[in-house]
């Protein structure tokens, strides 16, 4: 997911012209992602992504789910910059879940750090197009030429007479005009919003406690748009087959139905749900049941067996990853020749476990199914796929499925899946009324779609004078879908790079986890680079600088973070480790500072630098870097999903701990820019480097190299 597809300017203008016809009632998203009337009066869809209200408020139609990353605010900032409006007048509405509004990955979805980098050019053009239409409308009203007018702070000004008209006054006239064939975008030197740090649009509601997440949906939410009789929202919870691939065989509903407040027991293919007047009553009913399950589809699956199989797979000559137009024969020939000519070969093996997403808000969805139509209120990252999956499950057309997106209490890739939404509509159809399904923490932990586990054997062909001729990656992984990112798109100047992969999935449900393959592969690569430096007798940063001799941008990021760390004196007993990552259109480097006393590890601070091309909101980028580092550090220190007899052992945060505040390091972030480069992502890049940076620091402190994660399972405790 490194290359978002951008809509051409021609396509955008044509679609904008089609969408500009007519007036629409003004709506804005409320805290649950629902739509509600904003003010009396009208708003005009001025351009595909822009709506202008008679009250002067500007709405961005967005396709980005807000899950704490600040994407909606950043997108609004881009639009407002080109549209020449004040930040206080900007709002966000949901775009229709239609193909025109699909984002970087050809879906209406949020993931892969694709929101801002996928929409940056589109929204600049949209804002500039709307600005041009408003200027033309103002010129018509003033009886002058467009060149005599300018857009300023939500108004069109006649420069000579200083007469003004607001955007709200001009919107209808502007909507009837033909969009200009071309638009002039503002130059970076002219920006007054991009690069600044206005307050996020979602922050007030979150601070005030009024922000609505999926788990907050209530009867009032469900009935808000209803024209008929109000309905009472019931609550369901669920127990799914505890082993991978098993199904529900039978269940006696009587013990649950005997409890006051229990309304129904619903049987699904692989689960049983209890519907009640409230969540805790539903939990009591579920506990009273003793469902019988079919045997596991893959009995005996265990972490130990998977690890052994992957170590064996890493010794195989697996399937080779090929770049577009690449020749496997040629890649292998170059690699084989390099290893044949090597003065010495260095080989190391690294291992990373299965990981859960562990979102603090567990999976949940509210649904109602009536008259061949389904309506959902839920936290999702993938609205278009949710519509399709729900329609398929119900046997209806996707056009008869309405999705209201709430705020997300964490996504990290888990809510790219549709399972919980499908369950909710099946339960609601059985009940005949609106139902909110809430998974327990145990269900969430034991029925996720996990970050793949992998064993990565790395080999380097070295010259006698310390040059690196080739790097070969032998990946043993339960994910067979080219699990190579981070090992084939190296930032380093190495003549031959080849990655092969082998392995088999014994039935483990897999999913995208924040930063995807680089979360494992960068741990291996950046640990290996440090080990090569030790073999060569040079410092880790010296080797990286040498390998980045032809990449000035990456070298600048590396030198910036190293310089920031060097300015802070290193206390006695503390040691530092370095790691670099290039991906998602951005470059980031981190220095971790640790101490290790009698196997007790303390991560004191992390220095980080990122170059994402253009920093739309530096403060938000800093927050994303800090959050991503803590997220990745949690996994590096503690994270592991382990299996026994085809089921997950971990059930809650007692066995799958998160980083605590007293364990969290101080994180200092440098935000760098390269305006000549395409804009990059921010949400994913901070995650991959933290694990190798910490492990490299531990090696500097103790001389011991940890090649397997998490660290608490390698004999370390965390201070």
Image (cartoon, helix red, strand yellow):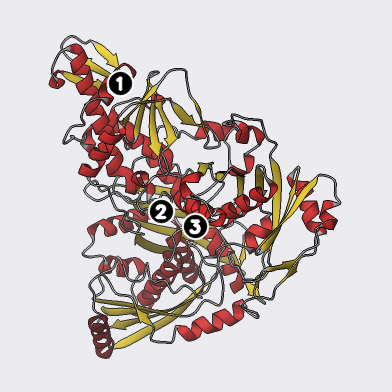
Q: CA distance from mark 2 to mark 3?
A: 19 Å
Report how many numbered discs are placed on residues in the image.
Answer: 3
**Residue visible at 30% across and 22% down in the picture:** 171
- In the rendered view of the protein, which quadrant contains the N terminus? bottom left
Vertical placement of residue 234 versus 239, above or below: above
Q: Earlier in the sequence, mark 1 or mark 2?
A: 1
Return the residue at label 1: 172
Looking at the image, residue 646 sits to the left or right of residue 706; the answer is: right
Any part of residue 656 in sight: no
For the residue carrying disc 3, how many other residues have a C-alpha within 10 Å: few (<14), some (14-19), or many (20+)? few
Element under disc 3: loop
Q: Looking at the image, is mark 2 or mark 3 nearer the viewer?
A: 2
Residue 512: image x %, image y %?
A: 47, 61
Q: Earlier in the sequence, mark 2 or mark 3?
A: 3
Decide: few, some or many residues near mark 1? Use Cα within 10 Å; few <14, some 14-19, many ≥20.
many
Q: Which residue is mark 2?
A: 608
Q: Nearer the viewer, mark 1 or mark 2?
A: 1
Judge from the rendering whether residue 49 lies leftward or rightward of residue 231; answer left or right.
Answer: left
Q: Earlier in the sequence, mark 1 or mark 3?
A: 1
Question: Mark 1 to mark 2: distance in Å?
Answer: 48 Å
Q: Residue furthest bottom?
A: 340
State which quadrant residue 173 falls in: top left
- Position of 706 relative to 602 (above/below): below
Q: Which mark is residue 300?
A: none
Q: Residues within 10 Å of mark 2 (few under 14, many from 20)?
A: many
Q: Quadrant of residue 268?
A: bottom right
Residue 668 percent coordinates (x, y): 44, 48
- Residue at point 24%, 44% (across, down): 11
Q: Tell me, for residue 571, which label it has, or none.
A: 3
Q: Position of residue 247 (x, y in %)?
A: 67, 69
């Amino acid at each position: 997911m490194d290359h978002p597809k951008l809509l051409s300017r021609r396509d955008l203008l044509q679609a904008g012209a089609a969408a500009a016809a007519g007036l629409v009632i003004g709506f804005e998203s409320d805290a649950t992602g629902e739509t509600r009337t904003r003010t009396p009066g009208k708003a005009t869809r001025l351009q595909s992504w822009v709506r202008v209200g008679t009250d002067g408020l500007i709405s961005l139609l967005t396709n980005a789910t807000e899950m704490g990353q600040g994407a909606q605010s950043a997108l609004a900032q881009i639009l407002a910059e080109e549209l020449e409006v004040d930040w206080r007048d900007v709002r966000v509405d949901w775009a229709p879940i239609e193909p025109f509004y699909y984002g970087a990955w050809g879906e209406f979805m949020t993931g892969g750090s694709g929101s801002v980098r996928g929409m940056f050019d589109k929204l600049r053009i949209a804002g500039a197009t709307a600005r041009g239409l408003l200027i033309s409308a103002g010129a018509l009203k003033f009886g002058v030429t467009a060149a005599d007018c300018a857009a300023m702070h939500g108004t069109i000004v006649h420069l000579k007479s200083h007469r003004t008209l607001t955007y709200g006054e001009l919107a209808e006239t502007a909507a009837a005009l033909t969009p200009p064939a071309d638009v002039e975008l503002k130059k970076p030197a002219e920006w007054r919003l991009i690069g600044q740090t206005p307050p996020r649009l979602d922050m007030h509601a979150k601070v005030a406690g009024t922000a609505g997440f999926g788990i907050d949906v209530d009867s009032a939410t469900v009935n808000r748009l209803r024209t008929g009789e109000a309905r009472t929202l019931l609550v369901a919870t669920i127990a799914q087959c505890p082993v991978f691939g098993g199904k529900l065989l039978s269940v006696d509903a009587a013990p649950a139905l005997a409890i006051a407040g229990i309304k129904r027991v619903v049987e699904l293919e692989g689960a049983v749900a209890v519907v009640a007047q409230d969540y805790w009553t539903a939990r009591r009913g579920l506990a009273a049941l003793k469902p019988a399950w079919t045997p596991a589809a893959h009995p005996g699956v265990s972490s130990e067996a998977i690890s052994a199989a992957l170590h064996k797979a890493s010794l195989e000559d697996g399937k080779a990853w090929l770049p577009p137009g690449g020749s496997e024969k040629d890649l292998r020939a170059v690699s084989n020749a390099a290893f044949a000519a090597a003065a010495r070969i260095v080989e190391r093996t690294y291992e990373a476990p299965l990981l859960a997403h562990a979102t603090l808000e567990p999976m949940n969805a509210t649904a109602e199914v009536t008259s061949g139509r389904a309506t959902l209120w839920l936290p999702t990252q993938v609205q278009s796929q949710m519509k399709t999956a729900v329609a398929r499950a119900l046997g209806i057309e996707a056009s008869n499925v309405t999705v209201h997106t709430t705020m997300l209490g964490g996504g990290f890739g888990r809510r790219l899946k549709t399972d919980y939404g499908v369950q909710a509509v099946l339960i609601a159809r059985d009940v005949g009324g609106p139902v909110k399904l809430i998974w327990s923490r145990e269900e969430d932990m034991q029925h996720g779609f996990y970050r793949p586990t992998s064993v990565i054997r790395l080999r380097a062909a070295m010259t006698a004078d310390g040059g690196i001729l080739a790097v070969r990656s032998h990946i043993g992984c339960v994910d067979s879908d080219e699990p190579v990112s981070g090992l084939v798109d190296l930032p380093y100047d190495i003549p031959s790079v080849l990655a092969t992969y082998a392995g088999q999935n014994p039935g483990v449900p897999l999913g995208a986890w924040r930063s995807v393959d680089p979360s494992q592969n960068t741990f291996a690569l950046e640990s290996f680079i440090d080990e090569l430096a030790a073999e060569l007798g040079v410092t880790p940063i010296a080797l990286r600088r040498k390998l980045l001799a032809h990449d000035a941008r990456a070298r600048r990021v590396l030198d910036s973070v190293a310089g920031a760390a060097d300015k802070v004196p290193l206390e006695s007993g503390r040691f530092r480790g370095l790691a670099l990552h290039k991906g998602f259109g951005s470059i980031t480097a981190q220095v971790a500072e640790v101490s290790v006393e009698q196997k007790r590890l303390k991560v004191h601070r992390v220095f980080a630098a990122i170059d994402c091309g253009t920093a739309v909101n530096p403060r938000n980028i800093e927050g994303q870097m800090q959050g991503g580092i803590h997220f990745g550090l949690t996994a590096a220190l503690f994270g592991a999903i382990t299996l026994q007899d085809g089921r997950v052992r971990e059930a809650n945060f007692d066995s799958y701990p998160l980083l605590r505040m007293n364990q969290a390091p101080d994180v200092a972030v440098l935000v760098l820019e390269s305006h000549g480069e395409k804009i990059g992502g921010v949400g994913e890049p901070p995650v991959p480097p933290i694990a190798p940076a910490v492990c490299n620091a531990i090696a500097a402190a103790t001389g011991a190299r940890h090649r397997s994660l998490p660290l608490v399972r390698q004999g370390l405790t965390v201070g």
